Image: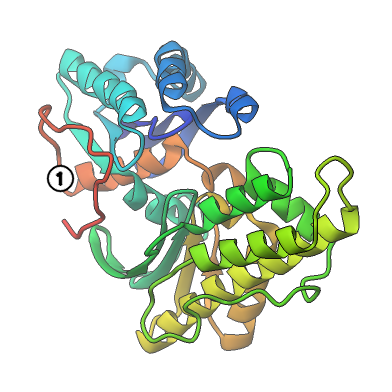
Amino acid sequence: MTLLGIETSCDETSAAVLTDGVLLSNVTAAQLFHAEHGGVVPELASRAHQRMIVPVVDDALRKAGVQRAQLDGVAAVNGPGLVGSILVGLSFGKSLAYALGKPFVGVNHMEAHILSNLLESRKPSFPFMNLTVSGGHTQLVLVKAPFDYVMLGETSDDAAGEAFDKVAKMLGLEYPGGPAVDKRARLGDPKAVRFPRPALDHPGYAFSFSGLKTSVLYYIRDAHFDFASPDTTFVNDVCASFQAAVIDVLVGKLFQAAEEHGVKDVCIAGGVSANSGLRERAKTEADRRGFRLFVPRMEFCTDNGAMVAMAGFLRLNGGRTSSLEVSAEPNLALTAS
């Protein structure tokens, strides 16, 4: 079975071709111009998707050595995300499936992130615990089987990735903020400032990062930070201390949930899973506690067509197709189905 996966939920136009669970190609066009605006501009993002969707899909098919007529199905994200961006990939995917007379699969963007670790040769075994960390979401999910999920906890305010972007902006760092903070954190002292670890000591698996973000803001303000002539050591130490606080919460909740639910495989996915500090700390904890850790390679951490193709392949293989009437849902929830 050969499937085309399309991802346009935010600011990456991506397409991938997968045959019987084996990835043949993955092509992504990133919208780097958003850095000029300090964040993603939805209208500009959707217009860029319109320009790039055809060449990206054609390139993915060419690199896979697959003709459109050879596809057995098409999958595209239908949410959550930016509605204008989602509509571009979703409309293209449905139209292509209709023109080819092949089944279409609408894919939940968060489900695709969860299944991204199945793209690797070393795969987690079900059930496993999954932490998805991105700019818009922080979710802890018990994955019992493909499409059988139990949402244990998610953020009640700012997602972890959003907090990274906002702290980067407070310090005058470049966009996207996650990689910028991570880079500076490697040069700083994580114990320089004791920022709060929100929700770490609270029962349950809910996350909250707005209080931590505010603590960083007040610390920077009280230190009379000079944007015109920033103190490099100060910036590095704030980044390292902030990142350490976020990682303590994420890793603490992840392994607490894994232990309480009796699973041995733990996964991290989403854009923030590319963070070097998070990957290192999670590996250390997994080794210490006797868990198997799975984190996707860098190209599968950020939004990509490959994870959509994998989710679509598993759904199509299980007879779970979608109507061509499926619509874009910017707030689509992750549910077992």
Query: Which residue is pictured at 27% across the width and 48% down the height?
Result: 314
- Image quarter (top left, top right, bottom left or bottom right) of the C terminus: bottom left
- Image quarter (top left, top right, bottom left or bottom right) of the N terminus: top left
Mark 1 — residue? 320
In-front residue for pair 195/57:
195
Q: Secondary structure at mark 1?
A: loop
Q: Amino acid at mark 1?
A: Arg
Vertical placement of residue 254 versus 22, above or below: below
Vertical placement of residue 105 versus 36, above or below: below
Using a 10 Å C-alpha cutoff, classify the residue at mark 1 as few (fewer than 14 neighbours), some (14 to 19) or many (20 or more): some
In the picture provided, is 57 more to the left or to the right than 180?
left
Vertical placement of residue 170 versus 276, above or below: above
In-front residue for pair 157/151:
157
Quarter where residue 286 is shown: bottom right
Measured as percent of width and height from the top left, residue 34 is found at 58, 27
In the picture provided, is 327 more to the left or to the right than 311?
left
Query: Which residue is pictured at 55% across the width and 60% down the height?
Result: 295
In-front residue for pair 11/232:
232
Query: Which residue is pictured at 64% across the width and 25% down the height?
Result: 36
Measured as percent of width and height from the top left, residue 30 is found at 56, 27
Asked if residue 280 shows in the view, the reply is no
Asked if residue 125 shows in the view, the reply is yes
Quarter where residue 190 is shown: bottom right
In-front residue for pair 135/298:
135
Measured as percent of width and height from the top left, residue 283 is found at 64, 72
